Image: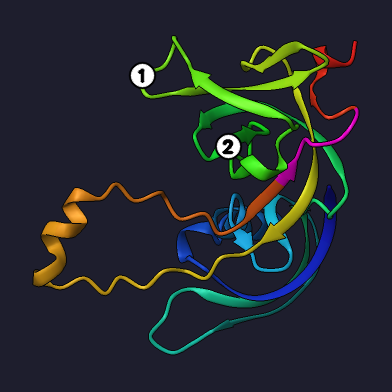
Amino acid sequence: MFFLSEIEHTLRLPPHLLNQPLNDAIKGELGSLFLDKVIEKLGLCVSVYDIRSIKGGFVFPGDGASTYTVGFRLVMFRPFVGEVISARLKESTKDGLRLSLGFFDDIYVPVPLLASPNHSEPDPGLKDGVRWVWEYDGVNYPIDGTDEIRFRVHNVSYPPIPLDQRNDSDEKELEQKVSKPFAPMVVTGSIDSDGLGPISWWV
């Protein structure tokens, strides 16, 4: 689930940081650049692990900042296909479940990957919300968010960044649609197997 990735980056260090120890100043700047950002094929950056090398320190004409080439390692969150992870229910809709790890919320379990057979019913606690129920041996087992949910990673994808191509003619149409926030990394999960789903199903 977590990996160390080694990266080299050309970093501009602003003049107001030059009075700090060099390692501390560079680590702080790397954190502001990379923390909570998704790097395609590497995953979500959780922390700057260490700095391996610092080269340069050039000050270009007309610029008070110094520029360094920094080699460093990042702790990345990147689940692998087939891995089993525990998460919490964030949202339940007609399309399936959305799960959260606390630091990462773009985990989706679509209806075909829910435990089957199943059905949905209105959730009395949420307006327009639904609750998914697994039917097994004549008993209904709801997914209501009270337990941790174990899921198996089915797929990890990095959707392309959407281009905003709005013009005056479709402004009204866009106003009528509620668009889902862009997620640079999406994990698709499955709970259609023994031992998966809310923990209370299996204890």
Q: Residue 169, position in %: x, y?
A: 9, 71
**How far apart are labels 1 and 2 at the CA level?**
16 Å
The disc labelled 2 sits on which kind of residue? Gly
Q: Nearer the viewer, residue 115 or 25?
A: 115
* Residue under the image location 15 percent in, 73 percent down: 167
Which contiguous range is marked in magenta?
189-194
Residue 144 in the magenta stretch? The answer is: no
Q: Is residue 99 visible?
A: yes
Residue 56 vertical position relative to residue 46 in the rendered view, above or below? below
Q: Secondary structure at mark 2?
A: strand
The residue positioned farthest toward the bottom in the image shown: 61
Query: Which of marks 2 and 1 precedes in the sequence?
Result: 2
Question: Residue 78 falls in which quadrant of the image?
Answer: bottom right
Residue hosting label 1 = 127
Residue 132 image point, x, y percent: 60, 24
Is residue 25 in view?
no
- Disc marking residue 180: none
Query: Measuring 44% from the left and 10% from the top, which residue is drawn there?
Result: 125
Q: Position of residue 105 (x, y in %)?
A: 59, 39
Q: Which residue is mark 2?
A: 96
